[in-house]
Image (cartoon, helix red, strand yellow):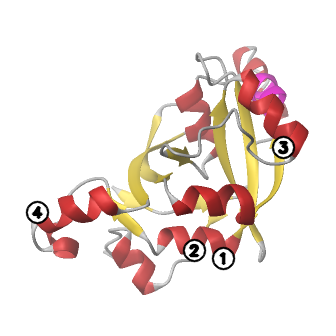
Amino acid sequence: MIKKIYASYDEQIIRVYQAFSNEIADEALKLGYLGNKFRLNRMTWIKPSFLWMMYRSGWATKEKQERVLAFDIKIEGFREMLQSVVLSNYDETIYGNCEIWKKMKEKSEVICQWDPDRNISLEPLDRRAIQLGIRGEMVYKYVNTWTVKITDITNTAYKIKYLYDIKRTDEIELPIEKEFSLSDKEKFILGIKER
C-alpha cells in the first residue's frame, strides 16, 4: 500500500490534528497552547490527515475526543519529528535486527504508525496516512516551541458530516491537502519504498 504524507501546509507551517475532551480543548484555546489539563508526560498522537482524524474521532463524537483542534506547527519541527522516527512495526531493511528495533522503539521520542487513509465516507483508501506518537522532549517542543496557532475545527467537522448525511456533498469544503515532499533520508526512516 502506498505511503505518502498528505497535509495542509506552506513553506513555514504544517497543520496537524488532535482530538481532546472539552476540558483540555477549552484550556488550550484560552491559553494558545496545551496547558496543565494536558499531560505532558505521556505519548500523544498527531495526524496531518483531516479525514483520518474524523475517522479516529467519529466526527468529534467519541468520548474524550469531542473537540478536534488543528495545530499549525513549524515545518522544521515537523521535519525534526520525522527524522527521529522509529516505526511502530518492525522492518528488517531499516533495523536489521528485531531486538535492536525493540530497544530503539522503547527509547524513541517519536513513533510512526501508518494506517489506511480515509475518504469522505470514512472508508479506507489504497494509501496509508501517517500518525506520529510523540513523547518526552518532543512533546515539550511541540507544545512550547513549534505550535504557532491552535484552531477549534469541531463545528467544521459537524457541518461536513451533516452535509454528507443529507447528501449535499457538492457543498462540502474539505481542507486542501497536498503531498508533503520528503528527502531520501526521511523516506528511508519512514519505511517508504519507491516502486
Relative to 99, residue 157 above or below? above
Tag nearer the camera, 4 or 3:
4
Whether the magenta-drawn stretch holds residue 158 is answered as: yes
Q: x, y percentage for residue 146?
A: 72, 65
Quarter of the figure with the N terminus: bottom left
Q: Measure the C-alpha gap from mark 1 to mark 4.
A: 31 Å
Residue placed under numbered mark 1 in the picture: 76
Which residue appears farthest toward the bottom when viewing the image? 184
Residue appearing at x 43%, y 52% in the figure:
127
Residue 41 shows in the view? yes
Q: Measure the C-alpha gap from mark 4 to mark 2.
A: 26 Å
Residue placed under numbered mark 3 in the picture: 151
Mark 1–mark 2 contact, CB under 8 Å?
yes
Q: Measure the C-alpha gap from mark 1 to mark 2.
A: 5 Å
**Disc 2 residue type?**
Arg
Residue placed under numbered mark 2 in the picture: 79
Q: Which mark is residue 99?
A: 4
Q: Earlier in the sequence, mark 3 or mark 2?
A: 2
Can you tell which quarter of the image residue 57 is in?
top right
For mark 3, give the secondary structure: strand
For mark 2, give the secondary structure: helix
Q: Measure the C-alpha gap from mark 3 to mark 1.
A: 20 Å
Dominant secondary structure (helix, strand or loop) of the stretch shown in magenta: helix
For mark 1, give the secondary structure: helix
Seen in the image, is 175 located left or right of residue 105? right
**Disc 1 residue type?**
Glu
